[in-house]
Image (spheres, helix red, strand yellow):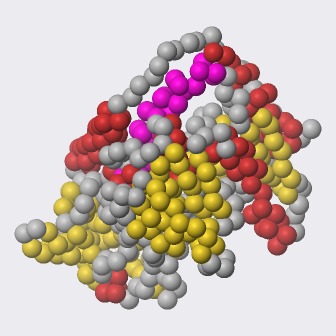
Amino acid sequence: MSQEFDYDLVIIGAGVGGHGAALHAVSCGLKTAIIEAADMGGTCVNRGCIPSKALLAASGRVRELRDAHHLKTLGIQLSGVEFDRQAISNHAKNLVDKIQGDLTNSLKRLKVDIIRGWGKVAGIQKVTVITDSGEKSITAKDIILSPGSVPFVPPGIEVDGKTVFTSDQGVKLEWLPDWVAIIGSGYIGLEFSDVYSALGCEITMIEALDQLMPGFDRDIAKLAERVLITPRDIETYVGIYARKVIPGSPVVIELADFKTKEFVDVLEVDACLVATGRIPATQNLGLESVGVELDRRNFIPVNDSMSVLSAGEVVPHLWAIGDANGKMMLAHAASAQGIVAVENICGRRKEADYQSVPAAAFTHPEISYVGMTEAAAKEKGSVEGFEVATTRSYFKGNSKALAEAESDGIAKVVYRQDTGEVLGVHIFGMHASDLIHEASAAIANRQTVYTLAHLVHAHPTLSEVLDEAYKRAVG
């Protein structure tokens, strides 16, 4: 380390992205400090991925044990299943505490200095930390910004944290409303609808766009709607938005047509979850001190190496990762970007490959995907001059899925018709979030269906759903 700096690397934000960057920096021999003003672990550990998966695990068990038809298929009969809401909530909280503790201890064990306070850039290679006891300055050869994101609340919606709330409050599961409206049908809305419906709540899902699950491949979304929404106690509005939401008992929701903005109806429900996405937490980071302006959506502009840009030019020794740069707002993408930034700090050229980063919704069954949707691939093909083909296989033809009596599901492969290169894979079904990684590796290595069709999969396993899809692609 150069003696003119306090640290080789200072990271602002100790979420999954900052944590991943810190671990990799230490492995590369960099003296590292990480600054955090709130909870260690950020959104993922405290208010996102971790507690929500604990709720989904518990509520999923309730759903499974109450499904008499499914159990009878397996030769099992149960009389009555009860649950304790507070105990389920405690399960999520205990998991958060454990993961948060593990994350903090891993940093301490590797001798990463943890500085509690609000960190902001104070100039090139300078950081100011505002703490309860005052303000102090730190110098670093390089700085990584990893401030994360916060829930987006559209205009007209008033959040009180009790009857109208975001996922930040929802993961605490402080009560179970008889009737809850969920605004948004993306990952967050779908997962909470899974939890609430399993625990006996009536749900109204409100989607402003003209189809549910707008971010998913259409074939996957259609089947997911048939399995995850239609048979459950969930009514839906599409092309409708919540123009006004007023907390209270009841919560009053004024609905309007998304295109015309004309009044449609008024709902009165017990609670309302606002699941309308997230926005970057990029205010008060001191970026003006180095001449950096946020883009129109308040993301920090970066290049593929994670270097921060000012008017298109690289700002020396300043990097931004995770939700704050808006490239791909996923916890594991943030961690991957942290490694990319550190590699470039160490002089080893590396760029993020977003095409091979998978994503998943942990509903029952799960949804996962990697790469392009069919529509996106065709758009790319029309520009670059190639045809796109797709192939599908179904869980109802998979021996392992049939043995589990979990045969709802599909695997869809999107590929170039000329070369066979896999462009995207989409899975809806049991353990989809685990199955997708085979496809992720295939895309990362730019493999073709011709190669993948000759791989050997253990039998009987769910992975044979992908094996079958690859084989169908080559006839």
Q: Is residue 70 magenta?
A: yes
Q: Nearer the viewer, residue 172 or 204?
A: 204
Q: Nearer the viewer, residue 211 or 50?
A: 211
Judge whether 252 appears above or below 313 on screen. above
Task: Give how far across and how far down residue 341 sits, in percent.
Answer: 44, 64
Left or right of 221? Residue 194 is left
Left or right of 321? Residue 362 is right
Q: Hey, which residue is sitting farthest left in the picture? A: 133
Task: Give how far across and how far down residue 13 sits, in percent.
Answer: 31, 63
Quadrant of the rendering where the C terminus is positioned: top right
Number of numbered tags placed on the structure image: 0
Rendered residue at 46%/76% (across/down):
155
Rendered residue at 42%/53% (across/down):
270
Q: Which residues are magenta?
A: 47-71
Q: Quadrant of residue 432?
A: top right
Q: Nearer the viewer, residue 366 or 189?
A: 189
Q: Is residue 163 magenta?
A: no
Judge whether 121 appears above or below 81 on screen. below
- Determine the main secondary structure of the stretch shown in magenta: helix
Left or right of 162? Residue 253 is right
Q: Does the image show residue 324?
A: no
Rendered residue at 58%/37% (across/down):
364
Rendered residue at 58%/42% (across/down):
233
Quadrant of the rendering where the N terminus is positioned: bottom left
Task: Give how far across and how far down residue 154 sits, in percent.
Answer: 47, 72
Left or right of 71? Residue 320 is left
Judge whether 425 appears above or below 200 on screen. below
Q: Hey, which residue is sitting farthest top in the picture? A: 75
Q: Quadrant of residue 391?
A: top right
Q: Nearer the viewer, residue 202 or 422?
A: 202
